[in-house]
């Protein structure tokens, strides 16, 4: 299973209503601009975000809604389902999973 590792700096940033919002300029160039906007809700562990592309041909939207999960939470769910963690890497090339990893590939089995 591949999953992202939640960014604690984004998720744990103090906010009055418990919802963090952000805007990130991903690409800026002569042919257009790509911006990501999003909201993290710490209570529901939900992320709603959208990649917005602006160019001479118009605006393109690429929305994404997901619930984030910490690797330890995923491990607990697997244990409750009768599975155990067999291996975890920082990506599909088998790189180590460590504190700098932004994703993990976790292998579970009986």
Image (tube, rainbow, N blue to C red):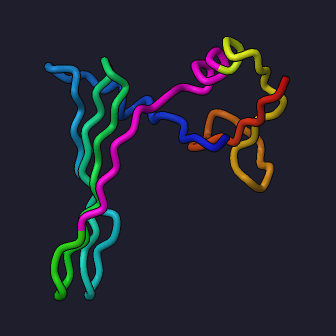
Residue 57 found in image quarter: bottom left
Q: Quadrant of residue 108?
A: top right
* Magenta residue check for 76: yes
5 sits left or right of 53 in the view: right
- Magenta-span inclusion, residue 95: no
Q: Nearer the viewer, residue 7 or 38?
A: 38
Q: Is residue 105 above or below residue 51?
A: above
| Quadrant showing the C terminus | top right
- Indicate left or right for 89 with 86 as reference: left
Q: Nearer the viewer, residue 84 or 41?
A: 84
Q: Position of residue 96 (x, y in %)?
A: 77, 42
x then y, percent, for residue 62: 30, 61
Q: Which residues are magenta?
A: 61-77
Vertical order, 34 against 74 (above or below)? below
Give the residue displayed 41% in from the left and 32% down from the top: 67
In the image, residue 103 lies at what x, y percent? 60, 43
Residue 1, horizontal then vertical, whole percent: 67, 40
Residue drawn at x 20%, y 75% is 54
Is 100 left, or right, of 110 in this rendering? left
């Amino acid at each position: 299973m591949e999953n992202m590792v939640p960014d604690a700096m984004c998720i744990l940033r103090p906010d009055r209503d418990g919802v963090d919002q952000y805007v990130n300029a991903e690409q800026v160039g002569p042919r257009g601009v790509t911006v990501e906007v999003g909201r993290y809700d710490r209570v529901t562990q939900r992320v709603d975000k959208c990649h917005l592309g602006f160019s001479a041909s118009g605006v393109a939207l690429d929305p994404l809604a997901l619930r984030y999960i910490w690797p330890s939470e995923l491990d607990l769910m697997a244990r409750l389902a009768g599975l155990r963690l067999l291996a975890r890497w920082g990506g599909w090339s088998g790189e180590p999973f460590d504190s700098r990893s932004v994703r993990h590939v976790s292998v579970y089995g009986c």
